[in-house]
Amino acid sequence: MAMAASTTDGEPMMDINTTPLIDVMLVLLIMFIITIPIQTHAVKLDLPVDDPSQKTPPPIDPVKNKVTIDPAGQVFWNGSPVSLTVLRQYLDQTQTMNPVPELHLQPDPQARYEVVDEVLAVTKRAQVEKMGFVGNEAYGSW
C-alpha cells in the first residue's frame, strides 16, 4: 500500500491505518481456533457379541487328540464341532508341543469320502506324523 503524504494546507489525512485492525483480527482468529473443541468423527459399528461357547477352545490333550467325522460330514475335535480352518489351527498347535500328541482319526462308516479326504489333506498340510485310524473294524462288514 502506498502511504499518502499529508498535504501542506493542513487537511486531515483520509486513509485509515488498517495494520492494527488486521493484527487484532488474526489474534482473535487464532484464539478462536485454539478454543474450539476437537471434533471426533465416530462411525457406529455393530460388532459381534462374544459367544460364550466359543470363548474357550476345546482343550488339546497332550497325549492324544481325536478327530471324528459324522455321517452328515461334520468334523469334531475331541467331541466339539470345528471347521477345517479351526482344525488346522489345532493341528498346528499340537505340532509345536513337546512331545507331539497322537492324532486319532475316526470317520463314521457312513461319512462321505470327500469330507474324510479333506480332513486327511488338512492333516498332511499340518505335517502331522503321529496319526492313526480308529474303528477300522467297522469297515470289515463290507
Image (tube, rainbow, N blue to C red):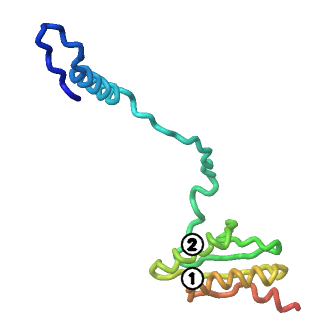
Q: Is residue 62 left or right of residue 28?
A: right
Question: Looking at the picture, how far across and down is residue 142, in whole percent?
Answer: 88, 91
Judged from the image, the secondary structure of the residue bearing numbered disc 2 is helix
Residue underneath mark 2: 89
Between discs 1 and 2, the one toward the N terminus:
2
The quadrant in which residue 136 appears is bottom right
User: What is the quadrant of the N terminus in the image?
Assistant: top left
Q: Is residue 129 above or below residue 42?
A: below
Instruction: Name the residue located 52 percent from the left edge and 40 percent from the top edge.
Output: 42
Question: Looking at the picture, how far across and down is residue 84, in whole percent?
Answer: 66, 73
Instruction: Name the residue located 69 percent from the left edge and 80 percent from the top edge.
Output: 119
Of 9 and 72, nearer the camera is: 9
Residue underneath mark 1: 126
Tell me which amino acid carries mark 1: Ala
The quadrant in which residue 78 appears is bottom right
Of 112 and 103, nearer the camera is: 112
Question: Looking at the picture, how far across and down is residue 7, in whole percent?
Answer: 14, 14
Q: Are marks 1 and 2 in contact (CB under 8 Å)?
A: no
Instruction: Name the residue located 57 percent from the left edge and 82 percent from the top edge.
Output: 126
Outermost residue toward the front? Answer: 9
Q: Is residue 33 left or right of residue 69?
A: left
Q: Is residue 84 above or below residue 136?
A: above
Judged from the image, the secondary structure of the residue bearing numbered disc 1 is loop
